[in-house]
Image: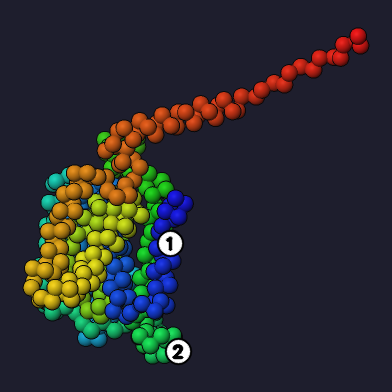
């Protein structure tokens, strides 16, 4: 049981030693790198949806803003040609700024109305990227992205760093970029953890539970919502920057459409809203199945059956599988696989009653143990008989 409590540390330890294992490969390592990037994006959405309770359907827009910011600042046919560190910092700031500016006019909206407006924001960003050909290269995407990691260092010809034959010669090759994304994912988890336990995080949770009650307690809902959007959009911009650098191109604008936003929402719901470890688990299960496991299973099925029929490929049925998983989750475990305690108690009142009774019994036991027991008085020895 103690090992299960620290499963995140065990997982990170296994991922850290993966490039050194005999079964590792550059192709699989690059797939894990994309998985880490999507996990960062899901953590950004968890701040907005899980902690603050804002149903935002445009997280893919910030992902795209981050990717195209890196592309514009690093490619050779633009005059900027900055390093990845500078471009990634600009991507985070740009995504956070766009998030704040587009959210400020709609702070009074709640629930479905907020979701519809944020959905429109995602569509606007998508069509802007697609139609601004002189800047975004339209549907072709910006490429090639070939920037150094920090100013003054190109990060090329890492021959002395190669300890295995399948390691690349550039800093954005496997496993150097793999470790960078893994390290940033760990840093994002620590950031979200500290935010959860901070005054700001507690205010977000209060706003999620009851905005009117939070206002009566002196909290400013407008500032709290803008802060949550800024953090979530900034993390989305960081994920987009890493994604563009991992592929060395921004890719097709269709990558940043509404489907990606819904996929991230599914990761948050599957893992457990408001729980960073649960969201991490949900992302690894859902994106891992989509990006890694389906390819492995398709190859195994084709090898066993010996047929190339598209109906025997799980990749063609993945959306149906995702839909069935969500239906089953909503029916039997709506709080997610690893839910936050508060949400679990809200959806299952019997658990709250049991926890309250256990807390009361523990308090009574503590009071009983803290009552001093006076020793029996010493009786003087009687006369000898």
Frontmost residue, 69 versus 1: 1
Whole-angstrom CA distance, mark 1 to mark 2, is 30 Å
Q: Position of residue 205 (x, y in %)?
A: 33, 43
Tell me if residue 191 comes above or below residue 373 in the rendering.
Answer: below
- State which mark lies toward you, 1 or 2: 1
Residue name at image x 35 percent, y 42 percent: 341
Q: Is residue 26 left or right of residue 357?
A: left
Q: Which quadrant of the view contains residue 346?
A: top left
In the displayed orientation, state which residue is furthest to the right.
384
Marks counted in the figure total 2
Where is residue 26 drawn, in percent x and y? 32, 80
Who is closer to the viewer here, 265 or 102?
265
- Which mark, by number, is residue 10? 1
Name the residue that disc number 2 marks: 160
Apparent side of residue 181 relative to residue 269 in the rendered image (left or right): right
Q: Where does residue 303 sit, x and y in percent of width and height?
A: 18, 76
Is residue 161 visible from the viewing direction of this image? yes
How crowded pointer 2 is (Cα within 10 Å; few <14, some 14-19, many 20+) is rated as few
Q: Residue 156 occupies which quadrant of the picture? A: bottom left
Residue drawn at (26%, 38%) of the image? 347
- Residue drawn at the location 15% of the way across and 53% of the way down: 324
Label 1 close to label 2 by CB (< 8 Å): no
């Amino acid at each position: 049981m103690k090992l299960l409590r620290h499963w995140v540390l065990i997982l990170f330890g296994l991922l850290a030693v993966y490039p050194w294992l005999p079964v590792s490969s550059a192709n699989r390592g690059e797939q894990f790198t994309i998985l880490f990037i999507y996990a960062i994006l899901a953590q950004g959405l968890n701040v907005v949806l899980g902690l603050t309770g804002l149903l935002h359907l445009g997280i893919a827009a910030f992902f795209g803003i981050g990717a195209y910011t890196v592309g514009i600042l690093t490619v050779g046919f633009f005059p900027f040609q900055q390093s990845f560190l500078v471009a990634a910092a600009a991507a985070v700031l740009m995504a956070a700024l766009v998030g704040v500016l587009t959210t400020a006019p709609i702070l009074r909206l709640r629930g479905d109305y907020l979701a519809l407006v944020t959905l429109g924001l995602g569509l606007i960003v998508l069509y802007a990227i697609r139609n601004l050909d002189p800047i975004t290269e339209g549907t072709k995407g910006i490429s090639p992205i070939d920037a150094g990691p920090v100013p003054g260092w190109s990060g090329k010809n890492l021959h002395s760093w190669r300890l295995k034959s399948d390691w690349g010669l550039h800093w954005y090759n496997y496993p150097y970029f793999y470790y960078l994304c893994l390290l940033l994912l760990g840093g994002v988890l620590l950031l979200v953890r500290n935010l959860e336990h901070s005054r700001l995080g507690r205010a977000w949770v209060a706003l999620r539970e009851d905005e009117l009650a939070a206002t009566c307690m002196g909290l400013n809902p407008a500032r709290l919502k803008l802060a949550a959007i800024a953090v979530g959009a900034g993390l989305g911009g960081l994920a987009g920057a890493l994604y563009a650098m991992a592929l060395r191109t921004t890719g097709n604008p269709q990558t940043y459409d509404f489907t990606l936003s819904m996929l991230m929402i599914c990761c948050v719901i599957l893992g457990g809203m408001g729980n960073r470890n649960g969201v991490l688990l949900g992302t690894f299960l859902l994106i891992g199945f989509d990006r890694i496991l389906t390819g492995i299973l398709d190859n195994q099925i084709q090898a066993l059956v010996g047929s190339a029929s598209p109906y025997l490929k799980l990749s063609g049925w993945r959306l149906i599988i995702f839909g069935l998983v969500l239906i089953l989750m909503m029916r039997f475990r709506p709080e997610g696989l690893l839910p936050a305690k508060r949400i679990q108690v809200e959806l299952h009142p019997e658990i709250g009653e049991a926890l309250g009774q256990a807390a009361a019994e523990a308090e009574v036991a503590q009071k009983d143990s803290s009552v001093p027991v006076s020793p029996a008085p010493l009786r003087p020895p009687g006369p000898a008989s």
